[in-house]
Amino acid sequence: MNSLSKNIKSQRLSNNMTQEELAEKLSVTRQTVSCWENGKSEPDLEMIFKIAEVYNISVESLITSEKSSAAKKQNNNKSLFVFSVFIIVTLLFIFLLPLVSQSPHDYAATTVKGEYTSTTQNDISGELIIDTYYDFEQISKCAEEFTKLHPNVKITVNGIGTYGSFEGYQKWIETSLKNGKSADIIDLGRLSSHKYAQNGWLCNIYEFMENDPKFNKSDYYTNVFTAKEFCGGLYSLPFYFYYNVIFISKPLFDKSEIEIPESLDYKSILNIYSAVSKSTDKSPEIAPGILKSSFWEEEFPIYYDYETEKSNFASEEFIEYLELTKEIESTYNPVEKNSEWDKTRVVYSDAFMQNEYIFCEEDINASSVLTLITDWNNIYPPVPLVNSRGDFPFGTYQADYAIAKNCENKELAWEFIKFCISEKDVPEECNIETVSEYVLGRFHTRIPINIKNFYNSFRFQIKYDLSENVDLQNEIIKNGGNIDSSAGRISKVIEQIHLWNMSVNANSADLYFAELIGLEMDKYYYSEIPAEDFAKYLQEEIGNYIS
């Protein structure tokens, strides 16, 4: 542990401040503070000034080690002079850099931090290999467009047929990364970018962003970047993401005299279900497609910390989660697979929300927006599904791309990734072909990481649904839905989704790791194992899952 790490921690402790409190003051994550204090990463110069300001000490005191008072006094003037020169040079560099980068002749930016440079559009050439599993069509389309713009670039995309199964894909990714022979760009959707970053196999994408004067972070949902950080770095970049919201039954909920919450977690859902069930003569179920493990994707980030590699599965909080969720009644048993899973969703009708179910879960995507702008008889507008800690989790099931450390043309890899996530032109014609190509083909109907792409794709889908998709409209109207196509209503819904997008703050992946534990939890749910015993077993076995 270096002097800076020790001083950050000692000052925090002497100020009776927790890591969470310091992180909040600095607008970073607790994990980032932990990495600073453990010497796994260091704050940049701007952040060092902020830390010193929070502690009300000089920057020199923060970055230097402890010396005897006599030595300090002897070296005071010399240190102050050196540090003053350092500050002056740094400030001159900060103020002059924008002037230099604005020069019309300076197309190739020099490296400011890290080992990477950004290249000009005219200089782009070389070869890239991309490994993906679920995202083959979308990334192949981007590769085709990119090589048309840059004829000197060759891109090879390896997809699902190369690996056979997802397990085969995972094994290939880990083996090739470990041997330094992986593809240049790899899709880590459902896989562990944290684990691979810790092993030093991935590039820190922040370094490319910071050294590229043509990249503007404010164009993107940077809260997603922050939530995916590992020790202050960003090692995989999702092209799009998703999260879940909950619809609530009007007829059943109104009888309970409970106020509509701003968000729902598994505890509040179970409490409301109990209250509503007692207030009606019906026998409603919680939600269609509900499983005992349905809330695990949201809850998982609470119980394992990738940066500290600490888990708390033996905690009272986790035992409570096991006991409460085991009480969920579901006709579907994933262990015995004795029945079909109920895939009912509020798309064409909300009639099933009148008597059968109290809640209905839906992930936010472009094709479901028509449901949100429709005034339904039997449901309230949806609210976000959060975890019991209050975090708002999102998922990246696919298209979560990383640049391998063994990539020989890292600048080209970054230029391609930047191209993939940049703003895309909206088609002039609005028909089923253009909607399929633009909304599904580019973003898989998910929420694009680029903010303008979000607005464009969701509005384009709505435009099609309201002008061309007559069959869908008729189906909704037939089932009691009043489609409000007014511009004000559409804008209000789109802005609400944007605010949700800005609020997501917890990464529910590594989904593969979460799913492995979920399979073990199914053994508990459908057996007579006591919750305490299972929690202890899981805590002891966690190392095996990681490895």
Image: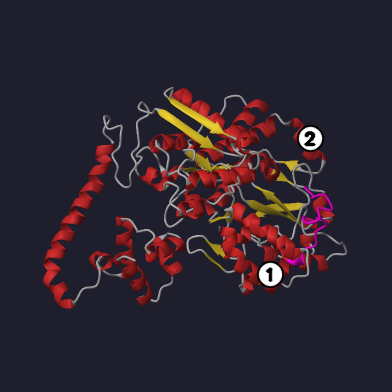
Residue at figure coordinates x 45%, y 53% from the top left: 199
- Residue 26 coordinates in the image, percent (x, y): 39, 62
Judged from this view, the residue extending furthest toward the front is: 179
Q: Quadrant of residue 465?
A: top right
Task: State left or right for residue 478 relative to residue 261.
Answer: right
Q: Inspect this view and state whether residue 442 appears.
A: yes
Q: Which mark is residue 208?
A: none
Residue at figure coordinates x 78%, y 66% from the top left: 527
Residue at figure coordinates x 83%, y 60% from the top left: 284
Dot 2: element: helix
Instruction: Give the labeled residue for mark 1.
Output: 534
* The N terminus - image quarter: bottom left
Task: State left or right for residue 445 relative to residue 146.
Answer: right
Residue at figure coordinates x 79%, y 39% from the top left: 477
Task: State left or right for residue 50 relative to residue 497.
Answer: left
Local crowd size for mark 1, using a 10 Å CA cut-off: few (<14), some (14–19), many (≥20): some
Question: Which of marks 1 and 2 precedes in the sequence?
Answer: 2
What residue span does the magenta drawing correspond to?
A: 326-343
Local crowd size for mark 2, using a 10 Å CA cut-off: few (<14), some (14–19), many (≥20): few
Residue flagged by tag 1: what amino acid is it? Phe
Judge whether 252 appears above or below 138 on screen.
Answer: below
* C-beta proximity under 8 Å, tags 2 and 1: no
Judge whether 124 appears above or below 344 on screen.
Answer: above
Instruction: Give the labeled residue for mark 2.
Output: 474
Q: Quadrant of residue 387?
A: bottom right
Dot 1: element: helix
**Coloration of the structure image:** secondary structure
- Residue 538 coordinates in the image, percent (x, y): 64, 67
Q: CA distance from mark 2 to mark 1?
A: 51 Å
Q: Quadrant of residue 121?
A: top left
* The C terminus - image quarter: bottom right
* Mark 2 vs mark 1: in front: 1
